[in-house]
Amino acid sequence: VASRRFGETVTRWLIGSSVVALGGVALVMWGSSGKAIWSPRGDALAFVAVVLFAAYFILAKSAREDVPAFEFQTALWIVGSVVLAPVAIIDAGGLVWPSWGDWAWLAGLLAVPGTGHLAMNWAHPRVRLVTTSMLVLAVPVITSTGGVLFLDESVNAVQVVGMVIVLGVLSLVVRREAQLLPA
């Protein structure tokens, strides 16, 4: 898609890097399969999320050709709220009014990841799709690390090896992309 729609060059080196990084992601996922909290449904949902996120990146890069980042992000949040509110209400078993503490957590959830999404949407016209797509492979590493730090979860040696592979490949990709930029 990146080469056809956006005229980006996808080299053999980048394809090879993608395969190696995906192998690292597979190790991160496979390493958790022996844990009591693991489920194949979770892995299937993660796969669906990856496909939808790839589609989102393509659509966002296309939309950002005509729409400024802040306006795009605002429209995205409105549409997301309308689409997901019924799902959340059904999942919660009805409307539940948040406590003041919940409002604080919601504000933080909106501010921190929302700022990251805004930055990524700002970057879409400036960064190649193949680069941003590769960087998304860091998500399993970041979420696993967050689980260790905040949820008292553990990672095993297989997962650590996968994380090192992913981060190593991504650092090489970012460095190479920076070298390819015109001075």
Image: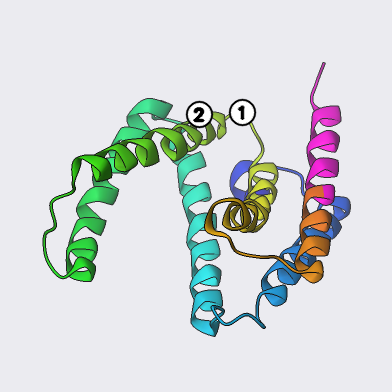
Can residue 77 be seen by looking at this rendering?
yes
Within 10 Å of disc 2 (Cα), the crowding (few <14, some 14-19, many 20+) is: some
Type of the residue with mark 2: Trp
Q: Is residue 83 left or right of residue 112?
A: left
Query: On the rendered image, what quadrant is the N terminus found in?
Result: bottom right
Please name the residue shown 79% across and 61% down the image. 160
Q: Position of residue 66 (x, y in %)?
A: 41, 30
Please name the residue shown 23% across and 69% down the image. 91
Q: Quadrant of residue 154?
A: bottom right
Q: Label 1 belongs to which residue?
A: 126
Compared to residue 101, the image places residue 151 above or below, namely below
Which of the two marks, 1 or 2, is nearer to us in this view?
Answer: 2
Can residue 19 be seen by looking at this rendering?
no
Q: Is mark 2 on a helix, strand or loop?
A: helix
Q: Distance between the residues labelled 1 and 2?
A: 8 Å
Q: Position of residue 44 (x, y in %)?
A: 52, 77
Q: In this view, does 122 lie to the left or right of 128?
A: left
CB atoms at circles 1 and 2 under 8 Å apart? yes
Query: On the rendered image, what quadrant is the C terminus found in?
Result: top right
What stretch of residues is rendered in magenta?
Answer: 168-183
Compared to residue 151, the image places residue 116 above or below, namely above
Q: What element carries label 1?
A: loop
Check if residue 97 falls in the magenta segment: no
Type of the residue with mark 1: Arg
Compared to residue 133, the image places residue 158 above or below, namely below
Compared to residue 68, the image places residue 174 above or below, namely below
